[in-house]
Image (spheres, helix red, strand yellow):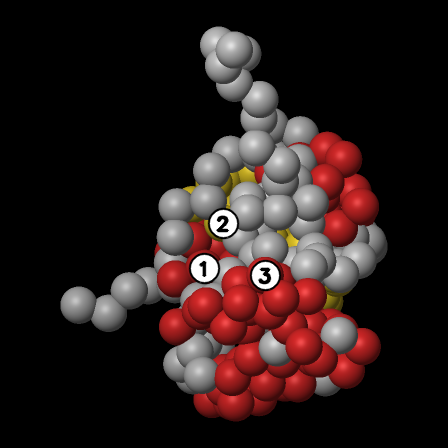
Amino acid sequence: MEIDRFEFERALLERGTTRIAGVDEAGRGPLAGPVVAAAAVLPETWIRGGLPEALHGLNDSKQLQPTQREIFFEFLAGRSEVQTAVSIVDVEVIDSINILRATHQAMNRALAQLLPPPEHVLVDGLNVATLAFPQTALVQGDARSYSIAAASVIAKVTRDRLMDEFHRQYPVYGFANNKGYGTPQHLAALAEHGPCPLHRRSFAPLKPPEPDLFDR
């Protein structure tokens, strides 16, 4: 059975809510690099009439091939009727306030760039207590809502391109391939070279072990 990925958007339209944003993040789990959040507002005509043919197959960015993500990204970014916004939160902030708070900060900053502001936000995952807008949290929302899927693609492609740039600065870690995730090759490079400024010191195995209070 095919999933209706505009179900939640249409329900909001029926209640009179016309400006609906999807929001998602990329980069919560890696050992290196920033976390990126993106927001996307798709036009009401798409919600009522369906996606343009060029976006057929739009889905959770993790389920797409890199070439598909790039195609969808370029289409979404190039359409005047689609509004998108991105926020990038760097490693220093992640290490100082933790990755969850940094992710929520990125989401709020991305949404704050949308003008006029959204009336309602569809969030991938769990409810975000600090979100500045009315919200509906959808677990696996990037596979259930086209608005969130669009935000997912924007966030993922933006972050992947950043990691490709960082690869040129720090090639020994293989960021172009692993995007900062803890692959065996990445962990081996860490063991040999130690961390670079892009590594998250608050993440294991980079985080120093907590002392055992009962170890005498």
Q: Of marks 1 and 3, which one's residue comes earlier in the chain?
A: 1
Say what amino acid the circle numbered 2 marks.
Asp
Residue 59: percent from left, percent from top: 43, 71
Q: Nearer the viewer, residue 76 or 119?
A: 76
- The structure residue drawn at horizontal position 39% and vertical position 52%, both measured from the top left corner, is 140
- The structure residue drawn at horizontal position 58% and vertical position 22%, both measured from the top left corner, is 211
Residue 58: percent from left, percent from top: 45, 76
In the image, taking residue 168 as reference, residue 39 lies left or right, namely: left
Look at the picture and state if 144 lies above or below 130.
below
In the image, taking residue 47 as reference, residue 95 lies left or right, namely: right
For the N terminus, give its image quadrant. bottom left
Farthest-out residue, front = 216
In the image, taking residue 86 as reference, residue 120 lies left or right, namely: left
Mark 3 falls on what kind of element?
A: helix
Give the residue number, with chain letter if any, for mark 2: 124
Choose top left, top right, bottom left or bottom right for residue 86. bottom right
Dot 1 and dot 3 residues touching (CB under 8 Å): no
Checking the image for residue 191, the label placed there is: 3
Q: Residues within 10 Å of mark 3 (few under 14, many from 20)?
A: few
Checking the image for residue 142, the label placed there is: 1
Q: Of marks 3 and 2, which one's residue comes earlier in the chain?
A: 2
Look at the picture and state if 145 lies above or below 112.
below
Say what amino acid the circle numbered 3 marks.
Ala
Dot 2 and dot 1 residues touching (CB under 8 Å): yes
Look at the picture and state if 57 lies above or below 151.
below
User: Can residue 19 be seen in the rendering of this structure?
Assistant: no
Q: Residues within 10 Å of mark 2 (few under 14, many from 20)?
A: many
Mark 2 falls on what kind of element?
A: strand
Residue 100: percent from left, percent from top: 60, 38
